[in-house]
Image: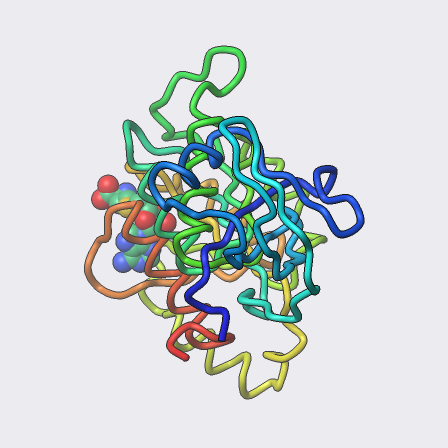
Amino acid sequence: ENKGMHKFFTPKELINGDVAKIIGDDVKHIYKVLRISEGEKVTLNNCEGIEYLGKVISVSKQEVLIEILEKLEDNNESDIKIYLFQGLPKSQKMDLIVQKGTELGITEFIPTITHRVDVKLKGEFKKLDRLNRIALEAAKQSKRSIIPKVSEPIEFNAVLERINSLDLLIVPYENANNFGIKTLINELRKDNTTNTIKNVGIFVGPEGGFEEEEIVNIQDIDSKVVSLGPRILRTETASVVASSIVLYELSDLGG
Ligand code: SAH
């Protein structure tokens, strides 16, 4: 019943007992664009996936106060978590990947530096704030229950280290022509392992792809190197496609 209601994310520190506060950019949006006023019901998310039904107490230019009416059990998260290790692409491609990936249900985006990454990172990754804002906006729009995180870029070898926290690491590789993602999913199903899979890593190469040596290294740690089909996809397409297939086959994408 409350699906059409506006949803806002506010950090859990601003939710005290039965009163929550919204500050920052959302305030102006609330009174100017959405014209929400006293008495209106809204959904609040504490930025960690817990959601509440609330009623607006007051709206000022500085803050919006909300009375917490009840905790909602609704959760729009899929039962598997997708961690996208994305070979860092040039220009605005990462924006697109974060936006579309958030809509699809990705949990974390991890920009990854591989041999053929052609982006110079000086000091801190400047785009991180912007990318996290894109994730926040897309999370609101698509009614996610969490805000996916865009992490600091990591090196190729750090992906190998994260394998222990994953149940499955899928590596799309255009030269893996004898092993498709369809075959992989069928195998998992036959082994009856699909319902034990909760944390899935997907590692997509940058524009220039992976080097053969990288594929050899990643195969050594028991990842699944797969083909996405006979046509070469751009890196941003490959990430969206691979995530879609996994969420469709193993979880709730497609309804
Ligand atoms: N090196 C290639 C293409 C790289 S495409 C070239 O320049 O011709 C960028 C990334 O997308 C790849 O590293 C891979 O992870 C993924 N990708 C694209 N098309 C794919 C396909 N048909 N099968 C599997 N992975 C693919």
Q: Residue furthest left?
A: 231
Locate residue 157: give its quadrant. Answer: top right
Give coordinates of residue 154: x percent, y percent: 56, 31
Q: Residue at x 78, y 44 (%)?
A: 16
Asked whether, in this view, residue 20 is left or right of residue 205, the answer is right
Q: Residue at x 27, y 52 (%)?
A: 237
Colour theme: rainbow
Q: Residue furthest right?
A: 17
Give coordinates of residue 128: x percent, y percent: 48, 27
Locate residue 39: give its quadrant. Answer: bottom right
Is there any visible trace of residue 174 in the rendered image? no
**101 in relation to 113, above or below:** below
Is there any visible trace of residue 89 in the rendered image? yes
Give coordinates of residue 222: x percent, y percent: 61, 59
Q: Residue at x 43, y 24 (%)?
A: 127
Give coordinates of residue 40: x percent, y percent: 50, 56
Q: Residue at x 49, y 59 (%)?
A: 170
**120 in relation to 80, above or below:** above
